[in-house]
Amino acid sequence: MKRLPSTQTMYRALVERDTSFEGVFFVAVKTTKIFCRPTCSAKKPKFENVEFFSTSSQALYAGYRPCLRCTPLNREKEAPALVQQLRERVEQSPTDRISGADLRALGIDPSTARRQFQRYYGMTFQAYQRARRMGLAFSEIRNGESIITAQVRTGYESASGFWDAFRKIFGTPPSQAEDVECLYARWIETPLGAMVALANRDGLYLLEFVDRRGLEREILLLRNRTQSVIVPGNNPHLDQIADELDDYFSGRCMHFSVPLVLMGSAFEKRVWEFLGKILPGETRSYAELADKLEIPRRPARSVVPTAKIV
């Protein structure tokens, strides 16, 4: 992950529209929920209303949508007509999934959509959809508020889009989650990117980077297994993992002691227990893991000699 300049330097570059900072950072405006290039011609926001990201995908996962004026996702001045069409389709209903079958019904080849998005946006069409959908849902967690209806009204063209995204991924709108079993969620910034942590009174259930592929499915499975809904909130185990991550990335401590809730088969738990005993800086091979856990290895395939016919 590239290191960003100081916030004062980036804000000065934004105000002066310094072209030398193109590609160095993206700026997001908290009041409009839009992110831009450093050289965007829009009216400059106040310093306290902006935050900076090193990549466009980070801004998407933080819940911001791309500016239509400076088009921060475009690799060239103007995106192809197909890319613009699909982007507009996503923004009409960012919580919906547009599948390959849906694209074909529109007369669009899914592989063409994937290639063109990858070329101009640096991510596939499916990745763009997922980033917008997850960004909407993560916005509640990231801000750490119980209800942010006012922010939704000012930040999104459709307030229902936020609630739909939250309900589809986390189980129920935050306003209806008071009387059910909950996993509490927190957004944690790290030098390697933002992470999301889920915990309840028993311990930590999940800690993962927000842009990891498959995270949405993992959250849904965890929600179903625990019969819980996921809401933003405070929890001692979330406080602990946030502090321990800060110590780890600062080099003060390499040890994690937060209680973990491991949901898996007996075999999976044996594997995780072994992995948890590996000290920082040490490595183990798959063969060592198999030997330690007495996992029988597959016999090597025997080579059957063939007779040469003369």
Image (cartoon, rainbow, N blue to C red):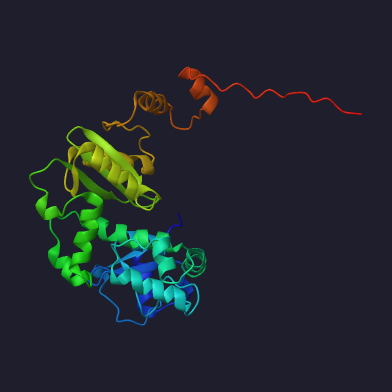
Quadrant, the N terminus? bottom left
Instruction: Provide residue 105's location: percent of width, then percent of height.
Output: 41, 68
User: In front here: 16 or 165?
Assistant: 165
* The image quarter in which residue 103 lies: bottom left
Residue at 30 percent across and 32 percent down: it is 263
Q: Residue furthest top?
A: 294
Left or right: 177 as drawn, with respect to 58: left
Residue at 60 percent across and 21 percent down: it is 299
Left or right: 161 as drawn, with respect to 282: left
* The image quarter in which residue 127 lies: bottom left
Instruction: Provide residue 107's location: percent of width, then percent of height.
Output: 45, 72
Residue at 38 percent across and 79 percent down: it is 40
Q: Residue furthest front?
A: 309
Check the image and report above or below for 138 versus 280.
below
Instruction: Provide residue 211's location: percent of width, then percent of height.
Output: 38, 53
Check the image and report above or below for 31 versus 259.
below
Quadrant, the C terminus? top right
User: In front here: 37 or 275?
Assistant: 275
* The image quarter in which residue 9 lies: bottom left
Instruction: Provide residue 54's location: percent of width, then percent of height.
Output: 41, 62
User: In front here: 244 or 151?
Assistant: 151
Q: Is residue 243 visible?
A: no
Residue at 48 percent across and 32 percent down: it is 281
Q: Is residue 226 visible?
A: yes
